[in-house]
Amino acid sequence: MPIIDENWKMKRRYNWYLKILRKCHKVRLRMLLLSNPISDSEIGQKIYNEKQFIIQVAFGGLGDHLIYSSLPELLWKQKGIKTFISNKSIFRSKAIRDFIWGLNPYVTFTNEKGWYSYKALKHNFPTLDGYFQNLLGLQADGLPKIYYKPNMIKQLRGRVIVDPSCGVTGKANGYFEPDFYKRFIQYIKDNGKNFVLITHLHSGTKKELQEMIIKEFQPDCFQVKTIQQLADALFSAKERYLLHSGAASLSAALKLESNIVNYIKPSTYYSFRYATNRHIHLL
């Protein structure tokens, strides 16, 4: 099972070390993917003929896996098609594999290679989830699906939470820029008073921004150690301020309305623009 360690994610400023690791990731991915990929225009008919569907997720983040998470149950209940998850998928951590797929009663793991979106068709769906559901002829709400039942955290019940964490794609979204730090802090001053700051045990967070928030506001903090705890924190709060991250996708899977702070408008936003979330542009 290809696991990419979390520790490579947030090396400062997209430096040479991170560039090399990303190149290695791309080479490794090419070796794992099908040599003759199935185009999106063909995948629907193929799985209906074979009565099975093998998904191979090509990117390892929490949000990347949540994109596909609704499909297995929908395919089984609406089409009688069994879904398999390829062990050759990329998982940024074992925790993501276990949380998204290990808890899903509608999937089985396989060592075979599988489908990933290839030559995407033109569509008007705001998220990839909605596009995939439509591509396979499924009736659904365009949201991800999880099988974890969140628990209430007394410390966060009815509170406002701020989670400034993001993965390496945060660079493309402008989250690494000093100007974003200033704008985000000012926005929180104006809108997020008396909040709890969500911090993360793992290293895949925006540490510089987190430290600036602590220095500026000296807020109460709640440390998240697992994806389950992150789901619990999102569920417990009355209001959530997040970046484009796995937390934003997880919030949508929980059918919660969260405030997602945008800085610039690259195409990567629109793959995860869930209708349950409120999108705020700082530029």
Image (cartoon, grey):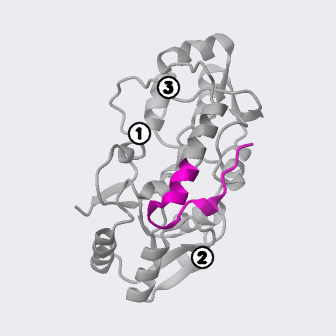
Q: Amino acid at mark 2?
A: Gln
**Disc 2 marks which residue?**
223
Tag 1 or tag 2, which sits nearer the N-term? 1
- Contact flag, marks 3 and 1 (Cβ < 8 Å): no
276 relative position to 65: left or right: left
Please state the horizontal and vertical placement of residue 49, each as a whole percent of the image.
64, 10
51 relative position to 262: left or right: right
Tag 2 or tag 3, which sits nearer the N-term? 3
Q: Which of the 4 image quarters holds residue 283? A: bottom left
Instruction: Give the residue at x 60% y 60%.
Output: 8
Q: Amino acid at mark 3?
A: Tyr
Instruction: Give the residue at x 29% y 75%.
Output: 182
**Disc 1 marks which residue?**
127
Measured Cα–Cα span from mark 2 to mark 1: 30 Å
Label 2: which secondary element: strand
Task: Return the mark for residue 84.
Answer: none
Residue 239 appears in the rendering:
yes
Q: Magenta stretch?
A: 1-22
**Disc 3 marks which residue?**
118
Nearer the camera: disc 3 or disc 1: 3
Measured Cα–Cα span from mark 3 to mark 2: 38 Å
Relative to 51, residue 111 above or below? below
Instruction: Give the residue at x 57% y 21%.
Output: 37
